[in-house]
């Protein structure tokens, strides 16, 4: 009941008869657990029942915040509630990795991250936002031409990804485990969708252009 924080790779490997998992916490608490995807397919495929009490509360308004890239990670780390964070200024790969770290560490926030106005950012590092369950939406700058493998792996709250139009490859495990990502558009610039890109994703609708 909230004590489990991580399930390692192959923890349930070979448990082919596993059909139901009962968790005594809430769905939100389950989503916060760091579950390593490798070797745990039986766990992902099992029916999940959460028995913890959860009282639905009214949706909190989104607060808009504009911040320089150099201060973005620290700002996000200290936020609460629902926030549209508009990042501006020079943003290196290292800076965006720090933002990803802040999103992983702050469980008490929902972030709509807008990077469209940053400069100098050409790639999203591998596993940059992995397990960032605070990330609800991200808008990339047009300057980004490469996304590293597993960049958004296990971002279970992620619902929207915008501005993929200059990406040529959707890499391995890029959106794997993004169970709330229900729709995505694969733009004409994409030539390759690598293995496991949308593994255990919540996709219900995909628009793929003929050039892929």
Image (cartoon, rainbow, N blue to C red):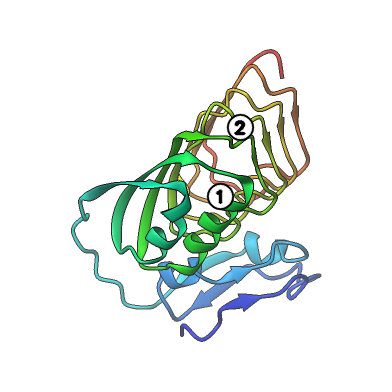
- Residue at the disc numbered 1: 96
| Residue closest to the eye, 42 or 59 | 59
Q: x%, y% of residue 111? A: 38, 52
Image point 29% across, 55% down: which residue?
Answer: 82
**Relative horizontal placement of residue 86, taking residue 98 as reference (left or right):** left
Q: x%, y% of residue 172? A: 75, 44
Question: Which residue of the protein is positioned furthest toward the right in this rendering?
Answer: 14
Image point 70% across, 14% down: which residue?
Answer: 211
Determine which quarter of the picture holds residue 71.
Answer: bottom left
**Relative horizontal placement of residue 196, taking residue 123 as reference (left or right):** right
**Relative horizontal placement of residue 46, taking residue 113 as reference (left or right):** right
**Relative horizontal placement of residue 179, taking residue 166 as reference (left or right):** left
Question: Which residue of the protein is positioned furthest toward the top in this rendering?
Answer: 210
Q: 4 above or below 178?
A: below
- Residue at the disc numbered 2: 144
Q: Is residue 160 visible?
A: no
Image point 57% across, 29% down: which residue?
Answer: 164
Q: Neighbour class for label 2 at 10 Å: few (<14), some, many (≥20)?
A: some
| Residue closest to the eye, 188 or 105 | 105
């Amino acid at each position: 009941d909230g004590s489990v924080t991580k399930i390692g790779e192959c923890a349930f490997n070979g448990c082919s008869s596993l059909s139901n998992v009962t968790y005594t916490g809430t769905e939100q608490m389950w989503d916060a657990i760091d579950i390593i995807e490798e070797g745990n397919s039986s766990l992902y495929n099992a029916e999940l029942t959460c028995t913890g009490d959860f009282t639905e509360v009214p949706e909190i308004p989104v607060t808009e915040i504009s911040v320089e890239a150099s201060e973005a990670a620290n700002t996000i780390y200290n936020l609460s509630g629902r926030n549209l964070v508009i990042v501006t200024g020079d943003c290196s790969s290292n800076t965006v990795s720090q933002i990803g770290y802040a999103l992983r560490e702050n469980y008490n926030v929902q972030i709509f991250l807008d990077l469209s106005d940053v400069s100098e950012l050409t790639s999203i590092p591998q596993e940059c936002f992995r397990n960032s369950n605070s990330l609800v939406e991200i808008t990339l700058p047009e300057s980004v031409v490469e996304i590293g493998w597993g960049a958004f792996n296990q971002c279970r709250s992620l619902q929207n990804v915008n501005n993929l139009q200059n990406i040529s490859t959707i890499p391995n495990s890029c959106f794997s485990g993004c169970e709330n990502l229900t729709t995505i558009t694969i733009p004409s610039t994409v030539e390759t969708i690598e293995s496991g890109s949308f593994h255990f994703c919540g996709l219900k609708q995909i628009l793929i252009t003929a050039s892929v």
